[in-house]
Image (cartoon, rainbow, N blue to C red):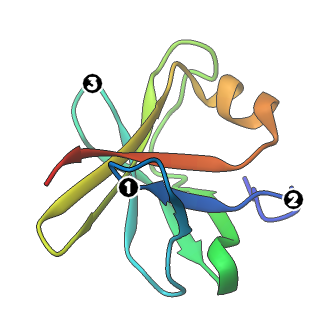
Amino acid sequence: LDRSSAASDVYKRQGSGNQQPIPASAFVAFERVSNSSRIGSVTIAANGRYELRLRKEYSFNWNTNPVKFHYEVNGAVYSCTYNSLAELFDRQGNVVLTLEKQ
């Protein structure tokens, strides 16, 4: 699955509420919430534009498996969780990772 055709970007939200695009080439994990297995790869391009590819070696339940984006930088942890792949793909908007831990 390729999420690159949607007009979506990925941002991190600082504690102050300011949003900043995730830098190009940053490592952002895409994980199944239940066991933290990385089920996809996220490629970040300029200005936070992203492409998500699900790994074909995993089986997915489109409607019931919660998934999340996970990004760490300088000891800070940012994430965004969706209740399912269907929810992520239905939204067609930007992904905003919020600060979990500093």
Q: Position of residue 53 (x, y in %)?
A: 62, 60
Q: Residue furthest front?
A: 16
Residue identifier under label 2: 7
Q: Residue at x 53, y 12 (%)?
A: 64
What whole-number distance in Å separates the C-alpha atoms at marks 1 and 2? Answer: 23 Å
Q: Residue, x 50% and y 72% (percent of image)?
A: 22
From this viewpoint, which residue is outermost toward the top? Answer: 64
Q: Is residue 55 above or below residue 31?
A: below
- Find numbered disc 2 in the image and state the secondary structure of the residue it sits on: loop
Amino acid at pointer 1: Gln
Distance between the Cα atoms at labels 1 and 3? 26 Å
| Contact? badges 1 and 2 (CB < 8 Å) | no
Numbered circle sitting on residue 34: 3
Q: Quadrant of the C terminus?
A: bottom left
Q: Residues within 10 Å of mark 3 (few under 14, many from 20)?
A: few
Q: Nearer the viewer, residue 62 or 78?
A: 78
